[in-house]
Amino acid sequence: MIWLRSALVVGRRKNGALICGLGVMENERELGCLLKCCSNLKHVEQAHGFMVRRALDHNKFILSQFIKTCFSLGFSDYAYFVFAFSAQTRSHIYVFNTMIKVLTLSHSAFEAFLVYKSIGSANLQPDSYSFPFVLKAVVDLQALHLGTQIHCQTICAGLDSNIHVISALIQMYSSCACILGARKLFDHACLNLVSMDDFAIWNAMIAGYAKVGDPDTAWGLLERMPQTQTNAVLICWTAVIAGYAQMDHPNEAIAVFRRMQLENVKPDEIAMLAVLSACAHFGAIQVKFGECIHGYIHKRGFYQMVPLQNALIEMYAKSGNICKALQVFENMNHKTVITWTTIVSALAFHGLGTQALHMFSRMETAEVKPNDITFIAILSACTHVGLVDLGRYYFNTMQSKYGVQPKIQHYGCLIDLFGRAGYLEEALELVSQMPFKPNAAIWGSLLAASNIHADAELGEFALLHLIKLEPWNSGNYALLSNIYASAGRWDKSVMTRKMMRDKGVRKMPGWSFIQVSDRAHQFIAGDTSHPQFDSIHGILFNINEQMKIAHHLLNEFGELLDFDG
C-alpha cells in the first residue's frame, strides 16, 4: 500500500488543492494519477481495489481507462476478467467499444469480434464507434464474409449513412481485395449521402486502390478530389506515391511527388519515405533527385527522424554511393536495430564484406540486439568475403547467443556460402538436414554453385527440383545448358535446350534504363508500349539507313583507292 499512498500524494500535488464537495471528481482525478503510475500487476490490483471501494467501477469512463491501462501493461487477461464481471459493462456500449478497440490494437482480432457479438446479449445496440472498431478486426482476420454481415447490420442500425462507418466499410472491402464493393459504396456515398468535400471516404477509397496495386485509378481519383483540406489531401497524395513505389513504378511515384509540390501540398515525413523508396528502386539513375530530397529533409527539420535517415541510407546504398550512406549513418545520434541492419546490408550489397562484419562488431559493442534480418545481412557479408568458418559460427550462435530462430532465408544464405566456396557436399547435407522444405532460392543457389565449380551432376539434380518449383523460369534451363557445354557434354546441352522448347518455356526479354531530362525510361526487348515508340523507332530507322549509306560509300571509296593504287 506504500505505492498506493505515494501515488495518491503525487496525484494531489499535481492537481493542487482538490475542491471539497466534489468527491466523485476528486476520486476520478486520484484514480487517473494512479493508473498513470501503474507499472506492474500489483499496482493494477491496488488501483482496482481503490475503484471497487469507491464504486468507481460503475463509471464507464473510469472502467474504460482501467481496461486501457491493463492492456498497455500487458495484462489483457485481467482486463477481460474485469470487463466480463463488471455490472457497468452490461449497461453501456462505451465499455464494449473500448474492449473491442484494445483487443484489435493488440492483434486479438478474433476475441474482438466475439466481444462485438456479445453486445446483443447485453441488450445493447452497436453505435457509430462499434462498427469501425470491429471492421478493423475483420481486416486483420481477412474475413470478407464477416464484413458483409456487419455491413448488413449497419443498415439495420440505420448507420449506413454515417461517414465514419462508410469509411470503415470501404477500408474493409478494399483490404479484403473486394475493390468493386468498396467502389460501389464510395460512388453511392458521393452521390447520395455526403458532400463532395468530406474527405474520409476519399482517403479510404484512394488508399484502397493503392493497396490492391492499382495506383493509376487512385491517381485518377485524386485528381477529381477537392483540394481544400491540406491534411486530408496530403494523406491521399502520399497513398498514391506509396502505391506507385510498391508496384515498382518509380517514375510515376516521382512524377506525382513533383505534381504535389506544384499544387503547394507540403509533404510530411511519410510522403518523404514513400518518395525515397521510389528513388531507391532506380538506383544511380535518380541519385540527384534523392540528394534533393535529402536537402529538403534537412530544410524541413525532418533530419532527426530515424525512419527517414534509414531510408536515406538505403537510397544512397542502392544508388551506388556507399560513402554518402556511411556519412548519413555516422551523423545519426540515435541508431535503432533497423539502422544498423540497413548499413550492414548496404556494405554487404557493395561487396564490402569485411567492413560489414566490422560494423556488426560495432553494433554488438553498442549493445543493440540484432534481429533475423541482421543475420541475413551478416551471412551475406560472409558470402561476399568467402568466410565459411565465420559464417558457420554466426549461423550456429544466432539462436544460442541472441535468441534468433534460424529461418529458411538463413539456411539459404549459408547454403549459398558453402556453394560459392566449393563446399558442395556440405551444402547438400545442410539441405537434407534443415527443418524446412527447400525452396526455389536454395535450389537456385546450388545450381549456380554447380556452374561455378563445373559440377554437371549437381546442376542436373538442382534443376530437377527447380522445374517442379519454377517451370516457367528460362534462366534455370539456360544455366544448366551452359554447364553441360562447359563440360563438353554438347548432347546434354542440346537436350536441355530442347526440353525448354518442348515445355513452352520462353526466355525472358532483357530490359534497360536510360535517363533523359531527369526522367528514366525503361525499354524491354520487343515491347512497343512506350508513348514515344513511333518517334524512337523512326529515328533508329533513319540512323540505320544512314549507316547503310555510309557503309556503301566507304566500300566505294575503298575500291577507288585500290584502283588508284
Image (spheres, rainbow, N blue to C red):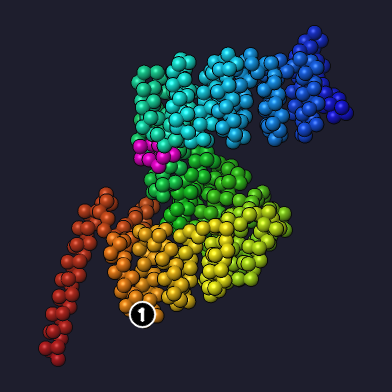
Question: Is residue 31 toward the left or the right of residue 414 in the image?
Answer: right
- x%, y% of residue 88? 67, 16
Does the stretch in magenta take in 168?
Answer: no
- x%, y% of residue 509? 32, 61
Which residue is pictured at 42% across the width and 23% down the height?
197
On screen, 424 above or below 328?
below
Which residue is pictured at 15% across the width and 75% down the height?
552
- x%, y% of residue 547? 20, 70
Query: In this view of the protein, can residue 229 be seen by the observer?
Result: no
Does the stretch in magenta take in 211?
Answer: yes
- For the residue labelled by badge 1, is the local secondary structure a helix, a strand or a loop? loop
Which residue is pictured at 63% across the width and 67% down the height?
392
Q: Which residues are magenta?
A: 209-218
Label 1 CA crowd tier, 10 Å (few <14, some 14–19, many 20+): some
Question: Is residue 329 toward the left or the right of residue 29 in the image?
Answer: left
**Label 1 amino acid?**
Arg
Question: Is residue 501 toward the left or the right of residue 17 in the image?
Answer: left
Read off the residue under disc 1.
489
Most foreground residue, 275 or 381: 381
Question: The N terminus lies in which quarter of the figure?
Answer: top right
- x%, y% of residue 358? 65, 64
Residue 382 sits in quarter: bottom right
Most foreground residue, 388 or 5: 388
Which residue is pictured at 18% across the width and 67% down the height?
546
